[in-house]
Image (spheres, rainbow, N blue to C red):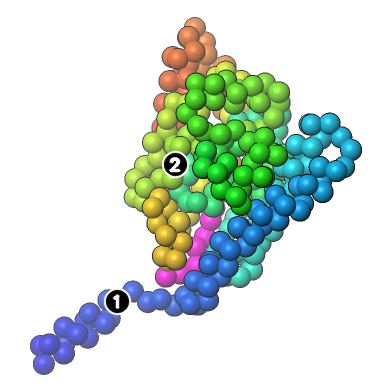
Amino acid sequence: MEDTSMDLAATQVKPSRGDAYAWRLLATGLSFLLFGLGGLTLRLLILPLLGLWPGDRLAQRRRARAAISRAFYLHVQFMLRSGVLTYQVQGAERLGRPGQMIVANHPSLIDVVFLIAHIRDANCIVKQTMWRNPCTRGPVTTAEYISNNGSPDMLEQAANVLREDQTLIVFPEGTRTSPGQAPLFHRGAAAIAVRGARVVTPVFISVQPTTLTKAEPWYRIPDRRIHVLLRVGDDIAVEPFQTDAAMPIASRRLNEHLHRLYLKELTSS
């Protein structure tokens, strides 16, 4: 009798895999497949065709970024309509301004997809591995994204695009946040901001339940559909952090401010 009760209790506390688990697993796999195919289609067909249109290098870059943004938007819509996730973006109309540096935390692999999907012409600092991946090498090169290759010139290159009035997306953590841990910002993003940004705009990203975190395989999906929320915060002026301060001190001040801000916002959300 005792063994039967224990078996019953174990059965009762076992997590349920409802909410169309099998279908969401299949749709998640299809999402990854379509992302790869989309990257190859951009590289081999769409971007070369856009390159045939008249225009200088700036026009070519804008067209490439617009195509990538549209492709990412369609990818987000596939994940939404297939039941992989739901999402909400609050304040998207304030993204994409000249000289704006967008700072975001990085809880999931798909964060950058959501951001670029809602900004037609944005630059972005991305991992060096993107240039070695056959699915992404063409798009990131044509869009003139910035490689996070650790070179001393990277900070100045990023500051220059802001001085040119481009919008720049930066993830100050450099990699995805480990589940259950607070984001830890490196000073590089703040150093870029004090060198070239007109304004810094924080975006607070939450993914519930957590998924596609660091070192987590794509097939380990949650037991229920995920919800992605992007909240665009208030603009942060750069000048107050530069008052009576050398560049390293200004960047440290801004980085500390960003760190406190994200701890507060992500804890209260």
- Given the image, on which type of amino acid does mark 1 rest? Lys
Question: Which residue is drawn at the image coordinates 22% and 79% (left, top)?
Answer: 10
Q: Find disc 1 in the rendering and name its residue.
A: 14
Residue 54 in the image, given as x and y percentages of width and height: 89, 38
Q: Is residue 248 visible?
A: yes
Question: Which residue is drawn at the image coordinates 34% and 45% (left, top)?
Answer: 181
In the displayed structure, does residue 228 sit left or right of residue 48? left
Above or below, 161 relative to 240: below
- Given the image, on which type of amino acid does mark 2 rest? Thr
Closest to the observer, 149 or 168: 149
Q: Secondary structure at mark 2?
A: loop
Magenta segment range? 223-230
Quarter where residue 255 is shown: top left
Q: Is residue 238 visible?
A: no
Q: Find disc 2 in the rendering and name its residue.
A: 175
Quarter where residue 138 is shown: top right
